Amino acid sequence: MTTTGRPRVSTTAVSVTRPATQHRRRTLLIIGLVTAIGVAIAVLPGHRGWFDIGVYHGAVRHWADGGQLYEWVTWNQYGFTYPPFAALVMLPVAALPWHPAIAANLTLTVVAASFLLHLLVGPVARRAGWPRWHTFALAACLFAALNPVRDTVSFGQVNLLLMALVYVDLWLLERRHRLAGVGIGLAAAIKLTPAVFVAYLLVTRRWRAAATATLTTAVATLLAAVVAPNATRTYFTEALWDTGRVGKLEYVSNQSLLGLVARLDPAHPDRLLWLCLVAAALAFWWHQVRRAAGDERLGFAFTGVLGVLVSPVSWVHHLVWLVPGLIVLVGATLPWPSTRPVERWRLRVGVAGYAVLSSGVVWIFANGSSGPHGFLGGNAYLLVAVAMLLLPISGATGRRTPDGMSAQSG
């Protein structure tokens, strides 16, 4: 007993109890989030019925049975829109029955998402001193709640698989590996839009990686041309230029700059205005990438945002390319709580952007987006992407290449 008559409290017991209590609270938080998000996804409208994997499965099977790859269409006239190399890659899944094909797509998507979260969130957790398991679980919950992620899964899309291929090159570039560029090259051969990362490699003077990516795309495309010459000819002379194959440009799901322009005047979209907006986006991107010299994660994040903006069609599920930018924003606000106004401002922008991308607000305007509220609501995801491209967040991730000079090195 002390002189005051109070029992002595063991500091060892307190130090042991506190981490156990924190672990329990974090675990309960994760369980609660998993339950809430799972119920919301199951109950709320928005499931897409595996539509896109149905297109892949049907078209590639039709082609494997001797039909023409780009002639096969669904009941509502949607057909295969990717290069022939993508059909070659999809042959194993197309050979499966319908439900096993869905299971295979889900499995590959989960693997790709896990790789991406481990690669992107891991360094942020280490910098902040957050527990690794709880941080990964929390990030996975927040990731699953995003509207682009929900759509990617329920459509049976390949967006996350392509992202994983591209971000393999981020991992290789940070280690100055000679194979850097192969992932981007394969992704661009499967779908053209990841080719924007070749532009990033060129702007940052990653000559070897840019050459590797270009050569990989060329070899994969030539392989498809040898195996499927008719499909290759049809794709590059007809299907590639037929924008009607992918849907209406003005549809609210198209959150690209051309989608915005098309919604302003669906009958006669102003192509000159679109080209001016694309030129402005390219200029801002070039400026941001140069400012981020040596920070590959920041450069990749900005390039993913650029791809969404300048692609003629960026459906909502394509906006998974904005996720790395959100993670970069989190890294730019550390340590918490921040005493710097600019970091608090970044955190507010990041939270607001995440809330918008999780909300599904654009679908409220699926049947019309007239008036100021319609313009803002119908282009909400696009406006988040624009804000992310304009944010001054250079040097935010703390992940620089060994020489710190990627913009000048080869």
Image: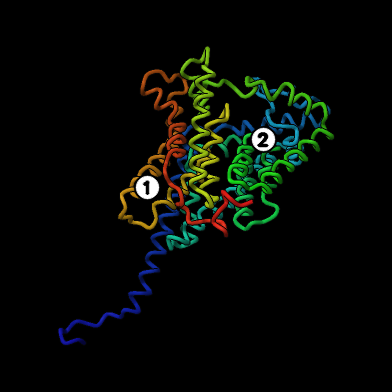
**Going by the picture, which residue comes out furthest to the top?**
267
Residue shown at 39% from the left, 44% from the top? 351
Q: How many marks?
A: 2
Front residue of this view, candidates 314 and 344? 344
Point out residue 105 in the picture as x, y percentages from the top left corner.
65, 42
Residue shown at 31% from the left, 49% from the top? 341
Image quarter where the N terminus lies is: bottom left
Q: Which mark is residue 195?
A: none
Pointer 1: what residue? Answer: 347
Q: Sort mark 2 into few (<14), some (14-19) or many (20+) by Cα contacts within 10 Å.
A: some
Residue shown at 57% from the left, 51% from the top? 406
Pointer 2: what residue? Answer: 191
Q: Is residue 183 above or below residue 283?
A: below
Q: Sort mark 1 into few (<14), some (14-19) or many (20+) by Cα contacts within 10 Å.
A: many
Q: Secondary structure at mark 2?
A: loop
Q: Image quarter for residue 4?
A: bottom left
Point out residue 396 in the picture as x, y percentages from the top left corner.
45, 52
Q: Is residue 209 left or right of residue 280?
A: right
Front residue of this view, candidates 371 and 222? 222
Q: Is residue 370 left or right of residue 237?
A: left
**Label 2 close to label 1 by CB (< 8 Å):** no
- What residue type is disc 2 on? Lys
Q: Is residue 246 left or right of residue 267?
A: right
- What residue type is disc 1 on? Leu
Q: Secondary structure at mark 1?
A: helix
Q: Image quarter for residue 222?
A: top right
Point out residue 160 in the picture as x, y percentages from the top left corner.
60, 43
Point out residue 192 in the picture as x, y percentages from the top left corner.
66, 34
Q: Is residue 38 left or right of residue 171?
A: left
